[in-house]
Amino acid sequence: MGRFFPFLAITMMAAMALAATAYPYKPSGFVPVSHVEKDGHVQYLGEFTVKRYNEQNHAYLKFIQVTEAQVLDRGTEHYTYKLVIKVHNGYAIKFYRSEILQDLSAPGHPPVLNIAYFMPL
């Protein structure tokens, strides 16, 4: 076993190095979206969320802008966004948080957007 152990250790290290190059590290967890106020897609998601909320709840919130956003890449063409959305409710400015699931996997079709939640902060 004395001569076999170093060989085994070197083989294991080589296999780990090969695996690390074959499968590059992809960070897990939500990543902040930079320049949220200028990101047209994120602003669209916020506006979509408020519009859908108004339709389903007979509400009259006015979308102002998304002030914070994070994105999670859940794999090929599947994303989750966490947003903080600034709205006006007719009396005052309020902030809501929302989570949107976006599926881009259907070629030739618009993205499928599902709102997981939309609630006041």
Image (spheres, helix red, strand yellow):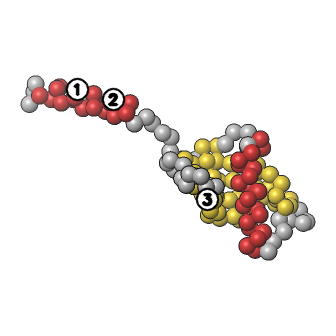
Q: CA distance from mark 2 to mark 3?
A: 38 Å
Residue ID for mark 2: 17
- Within-10-Å neighbours for mark 2: few <14, some 14–19, many 20+: few
> Which residue corresponds to the image point at 86% horizontal and 65% vertical from the top-left?
89
Q: CA distance from mark 2 to mark 1?
A: 11 Å
Q: Residue furthest left?
A: 1
Q: Tell me which label, 2 or 3, sits earlier in the chain.
A: 2
> Which residue corresponds to the image point at 71% horizontal and 47% vertical from the top-left?
41
Amino acid marked by disc 3: Val
Q: Secondary structure at mark 1?
A: helix
Residue ID for mark 1: 10
Amino acid marked by disc 2: Ala
Amino acid marked by disc 1: Ile
Disc nearest the viewer among 2 and 1: 2
Residue ID for mark 3: 112
> Which residue corresponds to the image point at 60% horizontal and 43% vertical from the top-left?
31
